[in-house]
Image (spheres, rainbow, N blue to C red):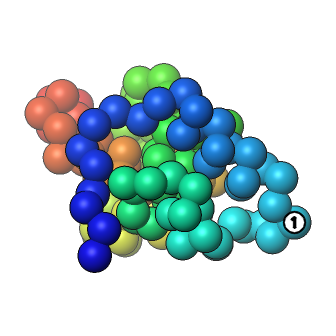
Amino acid sequence: HQQQRKWQWTDQEDSIVIDAVTNSSEQPFTRWSDLVQRLPGRVRKQIQDRWVNYLNPNIDHLPFSREEDLLLWECHKKLGKRWAEISTKSFNSTRPEKRIKNRWYSASFKKI
């Protein structure tokens, strides 16, 4: 089993992921395991998470707005901790499930 790297992503690694995903005829992209050969020291899950949570141009990286916090509150009442479903159905996938979950558990969110 390949050793998992713990250090920061390089611009070159990011470019490899971006090029592979955006130039693929397969959408949504699912060939994460193929990228492992091109990114030594990275595992499939790291590569996929890098795209989903950071590199995807459709992701909103701004802080959550008050309206989004209220939407999250309502969604959680209806759907519970189904973060992936909340991300796709209520946030149109602009907020990854990991960020939604982290926002839910953050101290600042609990103050609203």
Rendered position, 21 above or below 83: above
Residue 80: x, y in percent?
29, 69
Instruction: Label 1, secondary structure: give it.
Output: loop
Residue drawn at x 22%, y 35% is 109
Residue 22: x, y in percent?
78, 50
Q: Nearer the viewer, residue 15 or 85?
A: 15
Question: Where, by quadrant of the figure, is residue 82 drawn?
Answer: bottom left
Asked whether residue 73 appears in the rendered view, the answer is: no
Question: Where, by quadrant of the figure, is residue 25 drawn?
Answer: bottom right
Rendered position, 28 above or below 53: below
Residue linked to disc 1: 25
Residue type at mark 1 is Ser
Q: Which quadrant is home to the N terminus?
A: bottom left
Mark 1 is surrounded, within 10 Å at the Cα level, by few (under 14), some (14 to 19) or many (20 or more) other residues, namely: few
Q: Nearer the viewer, residue 20 or 27?
A: 20
Asked whether residue 40 appears in the rendered view, the answer is: yes
Q: Nearer the viewer, residue 39 or 17?
A: 39
